[in-house]
């Protein structure tokens, strides 16, 4: 059976560190969560199952963007808010979390 793709936004397979805003570390390489893909409307991330937010919850988060040619010469943080629309158990210790952005993302330079 073919499942129709109902996504409103094109997704990019981008792997960025992400964490709850209340736990944002000073060192970006210490972030344990990571996006699998991201779009203008939301993101899908992987997190340890014990830390992953539950479906229906809201979260404030920080995305960690490493420096790169064409967009930033320094490490950048992106702040956002979202609603967890789905939580998948990927393995005994990892969960996948689908987040719909509820506000525009804010860049920190």
Image (cartoon, rainbow, N blue to C red):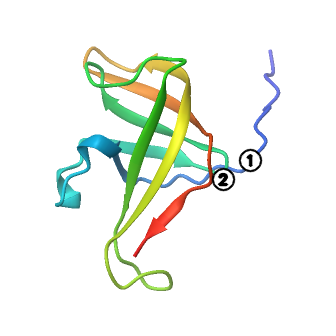
Please tell me which of labels 1 and 2 falls first in the chain: 1
Tell me where residue 20 appears, x and y as whole percent. 34, 40
Q: Within 10 Å of the Cα at label 2, are there few (<14), some (14-19), or many (20+) other Cα atoms?
A: some
Residue pictured at 32% horizontal, 80% vertical: 74
The image quadrant where one finds the N terminus is: top right
Judged left or right of residue 12, residue 27 is left
Q: Decide: is 50 above or below 60.
A: above
Hey, which quadrant is residue 64 in on the image?
Answer: bottom left
Identify the residue position indicated by label 1 in the image.
Answer: 9
| Badge 1: residue crowd in 10 Å (few <14, some 14–19, many ≥20) | few
Alpha carbon distance from label 1 to label 2: 6 Å
Is the C-beta separation of discs 1 and 2 under 8 Å? yes
Foreground: disc 1 or disc 2: 2
- Which percent across, then down, holds residue 9? 74, 47
Marking on residue 82: none
Above or below, comparing residue 9 to residue 90 in the picture: below
Left or right of 48: which side holds 38?
A: right
Q: Residue at x 49, y 81 (%)?
A: 71
Q: Quadrant of the C terminus?
A: bottom left
- Foreground pick, 30 / 77: 77
Q: Secondary structure at mark 2?
A: loop
Residue 56 falls in which quadrant of the image? top right
Query: Height in image: 18 above or below 76?
Result: above
**How many marks do you count on the picture?**
2
Label 1 residue SS: loop
Residue 27 placed where, x, y %?
A: 17, 60
Residue 40 image label: 2
Q: Position of residue 58 (x, y in %)?
A: 50, 28
Quadrant in the picture for residue 101: top right
């Amino acid at each position: 059976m073919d499942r129709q793709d109902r996504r409103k936004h094109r997704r990019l397979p981008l792997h960025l560190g992400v964490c709850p805003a209340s736990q944002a570390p000073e060192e970006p390489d210490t972030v344990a969560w990571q996006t699998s893909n991201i779009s203008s409307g939301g993101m899908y991330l992987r997190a340890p199952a014990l830390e992953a937010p539950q479906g229906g919850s809201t979260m404030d988060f920080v995305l960690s963007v490493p420096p790169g040619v064409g967009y930033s010469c320094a490490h950048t943080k992106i702040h956002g808010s979202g609603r967890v629309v789905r939580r998948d158990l990927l393995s005994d210790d990892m969960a996948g979390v689908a987040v719909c952005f509820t506000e525009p993302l804010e860049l920190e330079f």
